[in-house]
């Protein structure tokens, strides 16, 4: 296996965080993603189905195949979609992203969201997925980049907390800064017509839905959960960790702001052999 351990864990709280994130950012991340009726779409790394429900809602006539390496997450995804879209055409597969059980050119489109950041070999994964795309089929990839976070009020302890999470994910084999790399990764994997567009989230008191749904329930919990090991590993002291989390929460208070950028890439599988 060349995937990393999922640095955020598989707790009920993490499931809620993923779903809050997907629901809060649905228009931003999915507003321009829709697949024609009858098209075959692979969601690679569906997790708990947080993104799947929005894909299905936007493309009710498409035929989806959702794959994940974690069986418990896959069952949560299946239950989520069944509850919200009982008639959706979704097949579920428990499988390794690098060894998917499908013939070449099985799909018209591939969708990958918040997956590459957890892989040791993201370019290899993109090549493996390209083999499953028909010629001229498309791939859509969405990733974040913790280096894009702009905080007010800013603080050294908040920055240290963010840096600790980036370092922990890197030590696990992933990359919490991968958003900036999407264009070169897709190009190196052999895709054509690669286009990357930033999707910016900005939250302040005039946008209470984003303050609650993104700042409080999506962004900060990433660091609360993933970084609990940081003091034990000597990356930061317990006191500085608590100060950092407190500084992050000040961005959600009156007078605070948070800016964060996701990156959404689209590309085409050109005719010819996959290297």
Image (tube, rainbow, N blue to C red):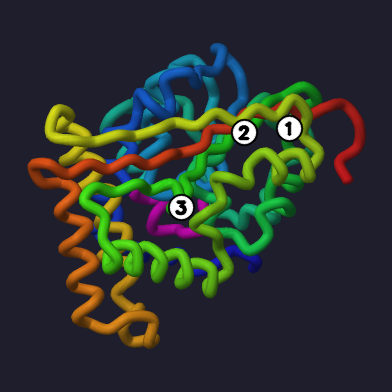
Magenta portion: prevailing SS class? helix
Residue 69 shown in magenta: yes
Q: Which residue is mark 1?
A: 133
Residue at 22% over, 57% down:
248
Outermost residue on the left side: it is 254
Front position among marks 3 and 2: 3
Tell me: residue 259, above or below residue 271. Answer: below
Outermost residue on the top side: it is 37
In what quadrant of the picture does the N terminus appear? bottom right
Q: CA distance from mark 3 to mark 2?
A: 27 Å
Residue range of the region highlighted in magenta in the rendering: 68-76
Q: Is residue 236 visible?
A: yes
- The crowd level at tag 2 (other Cα within 10 Å; few <14, some 14-19, many 20+) is many
Q: Between residues 10 and 85, which one lies in front from this camera angle?
A: 10
Q: CA distance from mark 1 to mark 2?
A: 7 Å
Q: Earlier in the sequence, mark 1 or mark 3?
A: 1
Q: Which residue is mark 3?
A: 147
Q: In this image, 43 relative to 154: left or right? A: right
Q: CA distance from mark 1 to mark 3?
A: 32 Å
Q: In this image, 58 relative to 208: left or right? A: right
Q: Disc 1 vs disc 2: Cβ atoms closer than 8 Å?
A: yes
Q: Which residue is mark 2?
A: 110
Tell me: residue 268, above or below residue 69. Answer: above
Q: Secondary structure at mark 3?
A: helix
Outermost residue on the right side: it is 272
């Amino acid at each position: 296996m060349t995937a990393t351990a999922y640095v955020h864990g598989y707790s009920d709280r993490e499931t809620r965080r993923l779903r809050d994130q997907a629901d809060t950012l649905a228009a931003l991340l999915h507003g321009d993603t829709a697949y024609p009726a009858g098209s075959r779409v692979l969601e690679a790394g569906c997790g708990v189905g947080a993104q799947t429900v929005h894909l299905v809602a936007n493309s009710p006539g498409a035929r989806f195949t959702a794959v994940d390496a974690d069986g418990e997450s896959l069952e949560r995804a299946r239950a989520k979609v069944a509850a919200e879209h009982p008639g959706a055409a979704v097949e579920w597969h428990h499988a390794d992203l690098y060894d998917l059980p499908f013939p070449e050119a099985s799909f018209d489109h591939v969708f990958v969201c918040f997956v590459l950041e957890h892989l040791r070999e993201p370019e290899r994964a993109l090549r493996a997925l390209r083999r499953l795309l028909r010629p001229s089929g498309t791939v859509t990839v969405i990733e974040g980049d913790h280096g894009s976070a702009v905080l007010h009020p800013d603080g050294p302890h908040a920055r240290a907390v963010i840096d600790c999470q980036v370092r922990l994910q890197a030590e696990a084999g992933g990359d919490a800064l991968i958003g900036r790399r999407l264009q070169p990764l897709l190009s190196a994997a052999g895709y054509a017509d690669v286009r990357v567009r930033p999707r910016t989230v900005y939250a302040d008191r005039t946008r209470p839905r984003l303050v609650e749904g993104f700042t409080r329930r999506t962004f900060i919990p990433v660091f609360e959960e993933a970084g609990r090991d940081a003091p034990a590993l000597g990356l930061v002291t317990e006191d500085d960790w608590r100060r950092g989390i407190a500084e992050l929460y000040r961005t959600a208070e009156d007078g605070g702001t948070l800016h964060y950028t996701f990156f959404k890439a689209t590309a085409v599988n050109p005719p010819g052999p996959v290297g």
